[in-house]
């Protein structure tokens, strides 16, 4: 019975291509392909990457990828370890650019009663805030300075009138061919991808199955910049090894494994 490496090598030679050509076509490093064909499967990579590369290489060579992975699992000593929890899983999510600290922790979570209807739990009582203005005139200890309030209102009204006068003068003195207001076009956005470990990335435009605008295999410290004109859909084989920045702002990335995210 042929080994895994012998089957891969025979299928590659049957296609009439070299290791280098296979590496360029599959985006898998040639040194990994050499080790696969020589049955040196103890590569210093997470188990999920080894299985993913083996499956992709088998499919490229027109072999049965499931059968090859099953044979690999039978001979792999790492089968059954707790690290299998990091195996690839297809998840569709959305990158939330808002900072987690801005979320309202006091917002009550919805609950479902026995009849199936959804209700919202009442919020927990909070400590009343102190205020300089009394709740009622009868319990006030500090009188409100009405004169100070009137002065503040007059100053605010004067500022508003001054602003209106300035804008009115500008509108009257502007040329007839110039619009009263100009709408600035939004600056072009930039998407920066930085790898902290090995990861294969694919970026599509407009929809999840739209045209591919970039695809590549990234290693630790590799980075790639893309212009962003609209919605992008990013698929990564190990999203935990990828940092995503839009116009210099890093997006939170609590995910792991193979993931497709929408970049709004």
Image: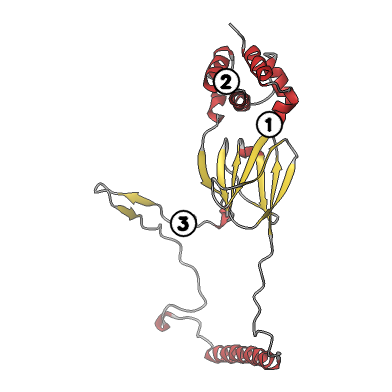
- Judged by depth in the image, the label closer to the viewer, 3 or 2, is 2
Q: Tag 2's secondary structure?
A: loop
Spatial CA distance of label 1 from label 2 is: 16 Å
* Residue placed most toward the observer, 35 or 168: 35
On residue 140, which mark appears?
Answer: none
Vertical order, 6 against 123 (above or below): above
Q: Image quadrant for the N terminus? A: top right
Q: Position of residue 214 (x, y in %)?
A: 67, 44
Q: Residues within 10 Å of mark 1 (few under 14, many from 20)?
A: few
Return the x and y of residue 73 as percentages of the image width and height. Answer: 55, 17
Height in image: 154 above or below 73? below
For the residue carrying disc 3, how many other residues have a C-alpha within 10 Å: few (<14), some (14-19), or many (20+)? few
Looking at the rendered structure, the number of numbered marks drawn on it comes to 3
Of residue 261 and residue 109, the one placed in the foreground of this image is: 261
Q: Looking at the image, is mark 3 or mark 2 earlier in the sequence?
A: 2
For this rendering, which residue is in front, 78 or 127?
78
244 in relation to 181, above or below: above
Q: Is residue 47 left or right of residue 194?
A: left
Secondary structure beneath label 1: helix
Estimate the x, y position of residue 152 in percent, counting from the top left.
Answer: 59, 88
Q: Kindly identify the residue that appears in the image at 66 percent across and 14 percent down.
A: 10
Q: Is residue 42 in sight in this rendering?
A: no
Does residue 113 appear in this view? Answer: yes
Q: Establish if 42 lies above or below 86.
A: above
- Residue on which disc 3 sits: 106
Q: Which residue is depicted at the point 49% across and 79% down?
A: 133
Name which residue lies at 61% across and 8% down: 2
Q: Report x, y in % for residue 107.
A: 44, 57
Indicate which disc residue 63 carries. 2
| Mark nearer the N terminus (1 vs 2) | 1
Q: Which of the two labelled residues, at mark 3 and mark 1, occupies the earlier sequence position? A: 1
The residue at which mark 1 appears reads as: 25
């Amino acid at each position: 019975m042929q080994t895994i490496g012998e089957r891969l090598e025979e299928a590659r030679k049957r296609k009439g291509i070299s290791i280098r050509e296979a590496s360029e076509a599959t985006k898998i490093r040639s040194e990994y392909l050499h080790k696969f064909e020589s049955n040196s499967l103890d590569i210093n990579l997470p188990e999920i990457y080894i299985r993913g590369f083996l499956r992709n290489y088998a499919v490229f060579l027109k072999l049965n990828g499931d059968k090859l992975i099953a044979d690999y699992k039978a001979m792999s000593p790492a089968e059954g370890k707790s690290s299998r929890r990091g195996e690839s899983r297809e998840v569709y999510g959305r990158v939330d650019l808002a900072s987690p600290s801005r979320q309202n922790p006091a917002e009550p979570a919805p609950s479902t009663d026995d009849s199936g209807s959804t209700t919202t739990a009442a919020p927990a009582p909070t400590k009343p805030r102190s205020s300089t203005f009394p709740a009622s005139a009868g319990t006030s200890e500090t009188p409100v300075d009405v004169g100070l309030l009137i002065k503040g209102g007059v100053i605010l009204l004067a500022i508003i009138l001054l602003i209106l006068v300035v804008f009115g003068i500008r509108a009257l003195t502007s040329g007839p061919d110039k619009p009263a207001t100009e709408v600035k076009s939004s600056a072009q956005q930039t998407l920066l991808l930085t790898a902290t470990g090995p990861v294969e990335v694919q970026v599509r435009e407009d929809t999840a199955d739209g045209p591919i605008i970039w695809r590549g295999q990234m290693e630790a410290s590799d980075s790639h910049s893309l212009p962003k004109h609209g919605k992008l859909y990013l698929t990564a084989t190990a999203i935990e090894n990828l940092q995503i920045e839009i116009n210099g702002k890093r997006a939170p990335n609590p995910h792991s494994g193979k993931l497709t995210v929408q970049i709004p």
